[in-house]
Amino acid sequence: METTRLSTKGQIVLPKDIRTSRAWGPGTEFTVEETGDGILLRPAALFPNADLEQVAGCLRSGRKSKTLAQMRAAIGREVRRRHDRGRY
C-alpha cells in the first residue's frame, strides 16, 4: 500500500503506479464521493448519459437519404458478396 499527503492547496498526488495502470493522464476528471469508509474517486464519465431520441440525427450528412428499397438492395448485395467469399 502506498501513501500520499494532502498539500496546502488541498491537492493529493496519486502514486505513479496507480496512474499508469489506470491510464490516467493529466487533466483526467474524477467524481468524488464520501463513503462510510472514506473517500471514493472515480473517473468522470466522458459523455453524459443520453437517450437515443436525444442523439438520433445529430450527425448530419451532406448526402441524400437512401430509400428503404435502396438499403435492402445494398444489404442483399453485401450478403451475396460475403457468401461468395465463403464468409457465410
Image (cartoon, rainbow, N blue to C red):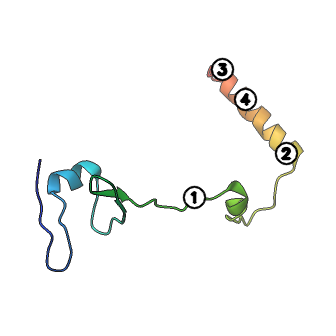
Residue at mark 1 to residue at mark 2: CA–CA distance: 33 Å
Element carrying mark 4? helix
* Of pointers 1 and 2, the one earlier in the residue sequence: 1
* Residue receiving disc 2: 70
- N-term mark: 3 or 2: 2
Q: Residue at x 36, y 66 (%)?
A: 29
Residue under numbered circle 1: 49
Q: Is residue 45 depicted above or below 74 in this figure?
A: below
At label 1, the amino acid type is Asn
Q: Is residue 47 left or right of residue 42?
A: right
Q: Neighbour class for label 1 at 10 Å: few (<14), some, many (≥20)? A: few
Between 74 and 51, the residue placed more toward the observer is: 51
Amino acid at circle 4: Val
Horizontal side of residue 6 vs 82, given as left or right: left
Q: Which residue is outermost to the front?
A: 36
Contact between marks 1 and 3 (CB within 8 A): the answer is no
Kindly identify the amino acid type of the residue bearing the numbered disc 2: Gln
Q: Could you classify mark 4 by the number of other residues whose Cα lies within 10 Å: few (under 14), some (14-19), or many (20 or more)?
A: some
Q: Which mark is residue 88?
A: 3
Query: Are circles 1 and 2 on residues that touch, CB within 8 Å?
Result: no
Q: Are marks 4 and 3 in contact (CB under 8 Å)?
A: yes
